[in-house]
Amino acid sequence: MQEMIAKNEIAGAVTVVVTKDKLAHLEATGFANVAAKQPMTPDTLFWIASMTKPITAVAVLMLQDEGKLNVADPVAKYLPGFADLKTPSGKPANLTITQILTHTSGLGEASGPAAQQTKTLADLVPIWLAAPMQFEPGAKWSYCQSGINAAARIVEVVSGMTFDAFLQKRLFDPLGMKQTTFYLTDDQRANLVTAYAKNKDTGVLEPVPPRPEFGPRDRPPQGNGGLYSTPHDYARFCQMLLNGGTFDGRRFLTPAAMKFLTTPQTGDLPTGFFQNDTYGQRGKNYGWALGTCVLRAPHDGVAAMLSPGSYGHGGAWGTQAWIDPVKGVAYILMVQRSNFPNSDASDVRREFQQAAANALAKQ
């Protein structure tokens, strides 16, 4: 990580490796804020962006475990407006919860001024329904923010709680994730890492402002990317998954629910962010489970040290958690870099995971 800081790839990082029952490694390197000389610490807060998605899927699966929904159900059972949704060919869309959680729904995205003015997840529903669908459901994989947010809205409808309140009561409090939240307090905001972008001309890291659509109290608790968390907190979430859905003797997910989170549900569709020549056309190396990316076959680069069946999710600003159930470890990287060409393929991630895998191999 010090090398990556020296190359101006990142200002600082927190790296974590956990097994199901212990913290194997936790280290903070560099600065959370360069100008203020504020050091990175294990309790620094990060916008974890799309690392929120697996947490959203866990919430849905908790409700399935209670018999309150089934991921094979039509979305329209819980969000009635979806009953009128038509595909590009004019057929009824009949979207399922599985499709919206695996990026195979073709649902249109919420964009423009109307989306920026929403205050609740319910406010977003008519905007998704007004957007033209992108393709016939199940025809392909295409990363879709609205689908994940629709799943978060279903959690609200079924549980009778706002999405943030449900996660707080059912997941964050019991797991001891004390700093994980959609809405930062003033104290937490003071502990929030500064994000940096690398200037393409000078190579210097320059601070960028927080994303305005996440964090304010009058914005929806967005299941696609709204959470802030600390390395320590997210490690506890990963340990629960490494333990097959249990943590400190408490069960959060049944083995059946864990299968939905760890087994591809996308058939033979190519998936993921390496589906072009730059990244080796790796679409067949990956499958998508509910809210998680699953590595079917390791390949050169960032996945070389992972076992088949490793699963997890990254975030827009370079954060990542990969859970390797074969080796029984999770690799968690917290950085805040806004313009990686592809944060899923970043050298920072590859170097961290390789160093961690090498150290584990020597034990």
Image (cartoon, helix red, strand yellow):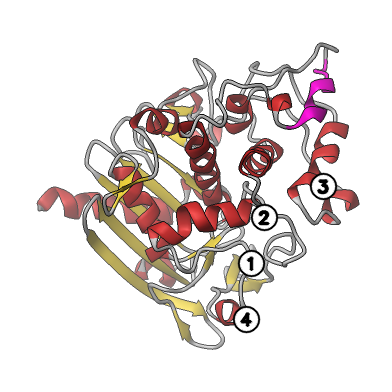
Name the N-terminal-most of marks 2 and 3. 3
Image quadrant of residue 213?
bottom right
Is residue 47 on the magenta stretch? Answer: no
What secondary structure is marked by label 1?
loop
On residue 186, the disc is 4
Q: Which residue lies at the image location 63% right of the left edge and 67% below the top edge?
A: 183
**In this figure, which residue is indicated by the disc labeled 2?**
221
CA distance for labels 3 and 4: 27 Å
What secondary structure is marked by label 2?
loop
User: Which region is colored magenta?
Assistant: 79-88
**In this figure, which residue is indicated by the disc labeled 1?**
183
Q: Left or right of 157: which side holds 317?
A: left
> Against 214, is 81 above or below?
above
Question: Where residue 178 sits in the image (x, y, percent)?
Answer: 45, 68
Name the N-terminal-most of marks 4 and 2. 4
For the residues bearing labels 2 and 1, Cβ distance under 8 angstroms: yes
Q: Left or right of 151: which side holds 257?
A: left
Name the N-terminal-most of marks 3 and 1. 3
Name the N-terminal-most of marks 2 and 1. 1
Question: Where residue 231 sits in the image (x, y, percent)?
Answer: 41, 64
**In this figure, which residue is indicated by the disc labeled 3?**
123
Front residue of this view, candidates 158 and 186: 158
Name the N-terminal-most of marks 3 and 4. 3
| Residue lying farthest to the left in this orientation | 363
